[in-house]
């Protein structure tokens, strides 16, 4: 993977947006690797992701990111753009939150170790101790933060302290079985959760039991950004698998684990590669 | 396909059920083609489907269905079985109900003509006239029965008259956009519907619009038996397809049509082949 | 669907291609609906599809396609572009070729009638007569052209005559069970075929038999452009479905029909919407 | 999971097989949990899997497996049955073979630790050392056995020694990138491999490169029993995922890893649960 920069834009739709952005990049000598746009005709919105090579640091052909940013900022203001400019030279610090069930954490850690997830993971937080050995194996700091209904405020204060200490910008709820309060959700990081159903079906607790009771023929899993409304945030990825009348609840749980691993790891990867734009309660995925 | 008989059983679970049924069939000389069982351990229920060859009518080796039935009935009583004994020598009379959207009706008629659906289709009923030419092409009687909120009772009386006249035992709601009243649902036939969402998500009207608004990444379709609760009957089959932020509502509608055709035609075929057992609000599919 | 124009481009990759094309469109007042690019870094190729509104014919705000074309042509020459400029105001004339099995033809005709396929279908050619009634129902001219090993040259001459008479630009082989010779493939039209396997597995005749013999757990279907090498042309779309040891060859055939309908109809729709770029033996699908 | 026994049978098809087996079980007081049959009409073969409760060891209601076996053996001889009688009270000893790529090994070890795979794993063998730390974390003995073209015979002798020492009955090739010789394949254990393509497409080395070159729209993975013919053994499970022209070979590799994990872990689980019957070059999966 070469050193590259990504520019993510959303703004009111108008003529010439692609021309103006791509011309500015061209003038600054960018070699574009990928460019993707989307227009929501109904809402009159425009979305763009463009990725280009930076070249080696200190080389003559190095793209001058600072100069580009200075030229781009006034254009963005004029066109009422919301934008993010990121490079893969800075790795995002990510914290994993989990409870007793470890298949998602184990999966994310293995993907991280094998280079599939390009980030730092300085911290694992859990309200249980099962994950401690795994954290040790991967050399990640583990913090046990017990939570009860009564102690949630204090526990979340401790969690935010840990996020701040580690400069965390993305919190992945990898089967963390506690609801987060609006307070911690205002912490300046993104929160990605995996819910073990095909949302919006079977929100809330015990979705596999509910799916079994309803007699569905497919079960699913959903990764989404967390908002204050439970299981209602912008959906990032979903997948399903076929089941039959033979499958009992424990079979659904087992089959669901494969779905959860996949939808959660895709969501994390897309977030790390700046492929996701949130708008309203939805996402644009530039994959 | 050879001439064959199917026995469908559900009863309280106890030891020796498979042995007793299969021994009785063996004693009567049955050559079993397929046998399948299911046990719901939680509810203590047992389900079985067994299919065997009948042989040619009037041949010496013809299985004596009448004699078997006389021997089976007392055993079934003793074991508290609910059961159906059917043969593929009698074709089920099926009525199709539809509205303006014809992709499901056209698909079912083509499958019927090409031999995929082994039934009679003596009747198509619609509250619109679009289907008339198609019915004519396939040589099926078409009846226009307009329905408004005010005239539903009279319309359903006419529909039941038509079902009775044609001896209909299965009514397929092939994108019929009117809710059936409890009165017609008490008519002694099965009613199969297709709902254009992945139930239980997006029940009721305009599910593609709701799916688009929620920002899901997969859309689905569901075929189910109709009960008095809207979109709540036993699910027979479901399927989904991947969509993206690029897809507008009209794209979902178009992609959904392929799902609807498939889940509805499978449900009809399984029903015709006596592969479905309903229990509570669920189905066992012996496919 | 608004009146729109599509520009499809492939050319050697170089900096500034997006900027130059989008700027030229902007200067001519285009309101871009969709734009999509792809870069093949390995081969050094660039691909682009851009679609914009034309506005009503004779209105003041009508996009001047002729003037744009005059300005674009020299740029295209300079940048060594291969390109196609098309509008949805002209419907492509399509011929369907089939044999005895009619599920694909019936499906395409229904989709065409219901507005899903935006083209003309002036002609159906078959080496059998089964399709005649269906052609009549949809008001399409049917031509019976029998073919044997010995008469192929004459039959193809007749087929080309029919293509020419009807101005056909796309030939869809909807389960047409004869191999086309290099001669007819040089006719200036595109040829799309559906093969009833997951290519490159099971090329040639009787793929369902071969799949059953090999004991695969999924079967597939593939739509592709036809080239002189049998079942080797650029793949447009593929899909698969799960099977089990219970499925006999005739079950594979039945299940495969659903796949064939879907992959073929998608390929035809994408071709009609100018979403496909062929290069080498592959396709770029801008969906 | 209760203590249970499984009987797997294949034999020439004849009337009364289900009746005779289920009656014998009934006479011995078996409480059947699952029973499944399959008939290959073409080859005249019958397959059966039946699972029943054993009850607690030393309890009065304990099923007498020894007495059943004595009664079953003569019947099996008479009916020319091949059969296996197994219980989940004895855990199968499994060895994992791998090379440098560890996603499959890591996945199997995690599933084993979390109870999803009911077996012993006394041994991991690799021709590389990358897996050593992982083996240590899960407390499994690791043996480094380097292999070159020249040293294969000696290396396999060492591998067989290790298999024998550990009583291994199932060898899982979890991305072990060396071809096994006929000699080691005659070792009395089952060998399950994962191949990173949708077999029979893209056999041999570098299947993702071949898939990319051919321009397929789906990639797959296959788990199968190993035979002397490379990538030709009985297929156990397959799965596919959609790709696009945007995906480079490294993307296929990454997406394929998820498929490989799933198809391999399913194959191992089904083998451990005695759900697989091999016949000819195919499998019956009683899932």
Image (cartoon, coloured by chain):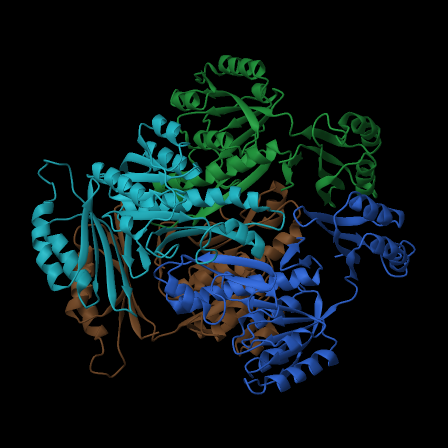
Chain colours: A cyan, B blue, C brown, D green
Quadrant into which the N terminus of chain B falls: bottom right
Foreground pick, A39 / A252 = A252
Q: Quadrant of residue A41?
A: bottom left
Percent across and percent down for residue A265 are 37, 43
Task: Determine if residue A211 is in view.
Answer: yes
Percent across and percent down for residue D82 are 74, 31
Vertical comparison of C211 with A129: above or below: below
Give the mark count. Answer: 0
The extreme front residue here reads A150
Q: Quadrant of residue D137?
A: top left
Foreground pick, A249 / C100 = A249
Instruction: Identify the residue shown where x is 52% and y is 40%.
Output: D199
The extreme right residue here reads B60
Instruction: Identify the residue shown where x is 63% and y is 21%.
Output: D188
Percent across and percent down for residue A93 are 25, 39
Vertical comparison of B119 with C19: above or below: below
Vertical comparison of D273 with C8: above or below: above
Task: Determine if residue C122 is in view.
Answer: no
Percent across and percent down for residue A42 are 30, 70
Foreground pick, C228 / C74 = C74
């Amino acid at each position: 993977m070469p050193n590259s920069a990504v520019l993510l834009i959303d703004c009111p739709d108008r003529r010439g947006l692609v021309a103006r952005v791509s011309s500015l990049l061209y003038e600054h000598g960018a070699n574009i690797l990928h460019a993707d746009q989307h227009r929501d005709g109904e809402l009159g919105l425009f979305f763009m992701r463009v990725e280009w090579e930076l070249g080696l640091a200190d080389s003559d052909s190095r793209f001058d990111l600072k100069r580009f940013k200075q030229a781009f900022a006034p254009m963005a203001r004029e066109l009422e753009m919301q934008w993010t400019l990121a490079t893969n030279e800075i790795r995002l610090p990510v914290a994993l939150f989990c409870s007793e069930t470890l298949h998602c954490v184990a999966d994310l850690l293995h993907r991280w170790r094998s280079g599939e997830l390009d980030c730092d993971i300085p911290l694992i937080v859990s309200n249980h101790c099962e994950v401690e050995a795994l954290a040790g194996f991967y050399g990640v700091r583990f913090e046990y933060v017990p939570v009860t209904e009564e102690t949630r405020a204090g526990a979340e204060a401790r969690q935010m302290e840990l996020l701040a200490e580690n400069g965390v910008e993305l919190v992945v709820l990898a089967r963390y079985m506690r609801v987060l309060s609006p307070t911690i959700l205002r912490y300046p990081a993104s929160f990605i959760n995996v819910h073990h159903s095909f949302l919006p079906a079977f929100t809330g607790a015990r979705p596999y039991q509910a799916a079994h009771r309803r007699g569905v023929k497919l079960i699913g899993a959903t990764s989404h950004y967390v908002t204050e409304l439970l299981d209602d945030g912008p959906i990032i990825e979903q997948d399903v698998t076929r089941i039959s009348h033979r499958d009992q609840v424990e079979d659904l749980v087992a089959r669901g684990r494969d779905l959860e691993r996949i939808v959660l790891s895709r969501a994390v990867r897309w977030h790390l590669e700046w492929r996701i734009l949130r708008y309203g309660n939805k996402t644009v995925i530039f994959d």
